[in-house]
Amino acid sequence: MGGQNTPANHFSARLRIQLSMAQPALSNIDVVVYALFKLGGYERKIHTEEIAYEAYCLAKERFTWKLRRFRDMGFPDKERVRRGLTDAAKEKYGHLVEGRADVHAKRKETDGWVLTPEGVTWIRKNEKRIESTLGTTRPRTFFVDMLRFKKRMREQPLFRRFLENENLEGQNLYNFTDMLNVNPDTPKEVIAMNFRRLRSNAELVADQQIISFLDACAQAFSTVLTSMATEGQRAESSSTDDLLLF
């Protein structure tokens, strides 16, 4: 009988216990941040619904609807994913992501999330643990994206001047914003976001020359970036307060 305590059943139970002990449980933050990474959140803003579906595909039991009739339809629990992303954005969890999950009160689409430099560093440290537990691998596009990023950075005139002079003396704001594909009149939070995205990619490829270059940029344009970052953080803080939950 299936309910009898046979040697086979006993062995199976022991094996399940050993496997659960060998593979520590993942948190919702682990899964949603990895889902964002797998979708390319190191390079572009990803919509909450995309992240929700990816997280559901990675861990169905964790992110499925509770009612059986909806669970059988394969609906991901977007609210649970949103909470995981919102927590991951908090300082106490490492400020791993930034973004928001809503449509602005004026109906302007603002939904989307990206990995922060801190989030990329966290991914590098936790990627193998998460992948071994979920039974998945890096996104196929990752290596192509990283090769393209390195090539693009090394072709930047500002980067070449840094290698030649070992500093950025004499370089003005126009040189810097040209590298970010914006101009000095672009909204400050956009410029700051573009710079943080470059910093995230540099951390991900672990290219020390590019990292040193971006550190030099942060120092050379510290006044501008500090004011930009402050304004961007203020905007993000206020946007979190007026979220329109789904």
Image: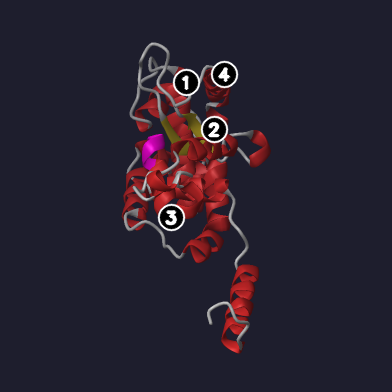
Q: Amino acid at mark 2?
A: Ala
Depth check, mark 1 against mark 4: the one in front is: 1
Expressed as whole percent of the image width and height from the top left, the position of residue 72 reads 37, 50
| Amino acid at circle 3 | Leu
Residue, x 58% and y 82% (percent of image)?
Answer: 9
Q: Amino acid at mark 4?
A: Asp
Report the disc number at residue 218.
2
Residue 97 picture location, percent across and down: 52, 38
Q: Nearer the viewer, residue 245 or 51?
A: 245
Of helix, strand and loop, which one carries label 1? loop
- Image x and y of residue 178, in percent: 35, 28
- Disc tally is 4
Figure coloring: secondary structure
Q: Which residue is mark 1?
A: 244
Q: CA distance from mark 1 to mark 4?
A: 9 Å
Q: Residue 32, relative to residue 61: is it above or below?
A: above
Q: Earlier in the sequence, mark 1 or mark 3?
A: 3
Q: Is residue 152 visible?
A: yes
Residue where numbered disc 4 is placed: 241
Alpha carbon distance from label 1 to label 3: 26 Å
Q: Which residue is mark 3?
A: 58
Residue 226 in the figure: left or right of residue 160: right
Q: Between disc 2 and disc 3, whose residue precedes?
A: 3
Q: Residue at x 53, y 59 (%)?
A: 130
* Element under disc 2: helix
